[in-house]
Image (cartoon, rainbow, N blue to C red):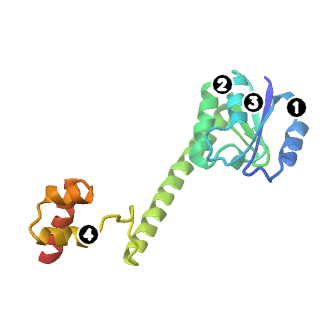
Amino acid sequence: MRLFGYARVSTSQQSLDIQLKTLKNAGVKVSRIFSDKGSGSNTNRKGLELLRIKVEDGDVILVKKLDRLGRDTADMIHLIKEFEEQGVAVKFLDDGISTEGEMGKMVVTILSAVAQAERHRILERTNEGREEAKLKGIRFGRKRTIDRSLVLSMYSQDIGATEIANQLKIARSTVYKIIDDMKKDNTA
């Protein structure tokens, strides 16, 4: 069994010193400590990629805290399962959590359930925020760049959709969409 360490901070202004010291004190050789400076949401983390390559069956990865491994619970679970498939255990020193043995499998299962609940809560909050914004009149999507009144004015002068599209350098389907929207507004 070889010990490896992983440390991460979110910005280049933050220091890895405390995490590195903790990993060294836990018995990890300096040559086996991998680190990243950058957001956990960045999936291209060189330290993590090197760690993935170096570890083998029976190795243990030490991490100071849960949130240092992944950007959120789902990402962390994905990484833990990936390491588990390689036969590599992960221990979180500050949290007292380890993925070793049967208890470790239970921990991964519990964390997976937490990750699923977290995704569900985020989705609910996002939808609530979207609905609230709609009630306040906020529109989503790209801003309109076509002068709809000009399209309707040309259409009311009996200029055909193809000619309007050619003159305004827009798609004919866009002209039809604007005309259909106007007709819906007039019937409502």
**Residue 66: x percent and y percent?**
70, 47
- Circle 3 SS class: strand
Disc number placed over residue 30 in the picture, else none: 1
180 on left or right of 20: left
What residue sits right under mark 2 in the picture?
87
- Indicate which disc, 3 or 4, sits on the residue closer to the N terminus: 3
Q: Residues within 10 Å of mark 2 (few under 14, many from 20)?
A: some
How far apart are labels 2 and 4 at the CA level? 62 Å
Callout 2–callout 1 Cβ contact below 8 Å: no
Disc number placed over residue 148 in the picture, else none: 4
* Front tag of 2 and 1: 1
Q: Is residue 27 visible?
A: yes
Image quarter where the N terminus lies is: top right
- Examine the image and state in which quarter residue 161 appears: bottom left
How far apart are labels 4 and 1 at the CA level? 65 Å
* Front tag of 2 and 4: 4
